[in-house]
Amino acid sequence: MPGAVAIAALAGALAAGGTGTSATAAGGHGPRTERVNTAPDGAQAVGGGSYNAAISPDGRYIAYDSAADNLVPGDDNDGALVHDVFLHDRRTGTTRRLNAPLGPGNADFATISADGRYVAFDAETDGTYHVYVHEIRTGRLERVDLDLDAGFTGGETPALSADGRYVAFLGRQATAPPPEEELGRIYVRDRRTGTTRRANRIPAKEGRGYDAPRISADGTKVAYRERSRRGGGPGGERDWADIHLADLRTGEQRQIDTTADGRPATSGSTDPLLSADGRTVAFNSSAKNIVPVPDEARSYAFVRDVRSGAIRRVDGIDGNPYAEADAISPDGRRLLLHSYGAAYGLYVKDLKTGKDTLVSPGTDGRPRAATAGPDGMTPDGRKAVFESHLDDLVADDTNDETDVFLRHVR
């Protein structure tokens, strides 16, 4: 396959990364919370926190990054705040360190393809971040941030199509650009043909940049954020970031954070989320004109139906309007939402029925603060992975670190 880096067979990757038995059994019934980032003997993670968890649609695999150094045997990637990417197999109870064959350096932001075959992540090699795709069955690593525009030499924050063929990612420049130039670009790599194309729109104003890509299941649509160093977007001086959707088949570029009649948001919008069919886009924004909001100083969650153009604000728990969307289900029906206020915590919200299901209860059953990544929920909403710094989501949490948890919602 073009662009492949013949780094490791599975045996070699396991030898370099190590395996271990899960500290929490995959069995059990009913709602429950498990801690994921544990050592082979069940000990707590030590040496640093764990973040950015992603779960495969069938719930078998959980990927995350961590600075802890006791999660697999032989972890020699030492250094302050140096993260590795780990893949935990709940069926076998084993954990792999995926970036081990790349040598020392930071690695993070893992994502898992919907077919459960691939994990993409970014890793620092020779002082530059690059995007790699790990094939779970064979352990093969492939670098994909290739054939970029002149001056762009690295990649970060990948997103995968359902079968892993297409990889969207943020392309970085080799050196910091001057104020009048772009801060980054969104690219899509076709691993089958070995070609790379730019996905973001050509900026209409100097000093714009692009990040946070999300890609549809078939690889034809990419949602991303456009941002500015100085504000002054189409919605006014407070409009420092907008959400766009690119259709790679037609070339259409569409702004998503607008009112129902197409007027641009008056303030910044962040964190695009895209359903598998590319029809639904969720995002967070403090704009007051998309749908009326009580306080422009706060951020709110919005969901847009791309086909009909309809847009709605999604409130938090018990009528509290303050909430942000962390993940969206493939069919666009559910959001993984962290809500503020008295019911501060992480919830699965069913947009069809309005039902809210708590994901981050403490040991006393009451909500606890937590956040999740864009791949933090299975399609049916029954399992979710998240991170929290609190020590009372499971018993005997005494490591004083941010941990990764798996919640069986039902």
Image (cartoon, rainbow, N blue to C red):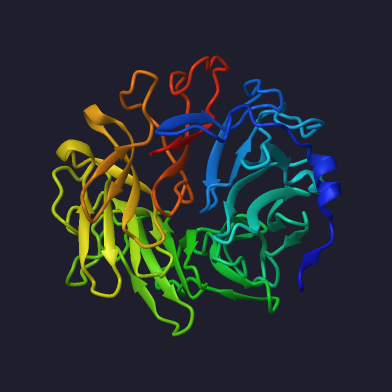
Q: Quadrant of residue 152?
A: bottom right
**305 vs 15, nearest the viewer:** 15
Left or right of residue 311: residue 273: right
Q: Quadrant of residue 117?
A: bottom right
Left or right of residue 259: residue 186: right
Q: Quadrant of residue 93?
A: top right
Q: Provide residue 131's location: percent of width, then percent of height.
A: 67, 57
Q: Residue at x 59, y 67 (%)?
A: 163
Q: Provide residue 393's location: percent of width, then percent of height.
A: 44, 23
Outermost residue on the bottom side: it is: 250
Q: Provide residue 257's location: percent of width, then percent of height.
A: 29, 62
> Quarter of the image containing the N terminus?
bottom right
> Quarter of the image containing the C terminus?
top left
Q: Residue at x 40, y 52 (%)?
A: 380
Q: Is residue 237 visible?
A: no
Q: Residue at x 76, y 30 (%)?
A: 78
- Residue 49, compared with residue 332, is above or below; it is above
**245 vs 98, nearest the viewer:** 98
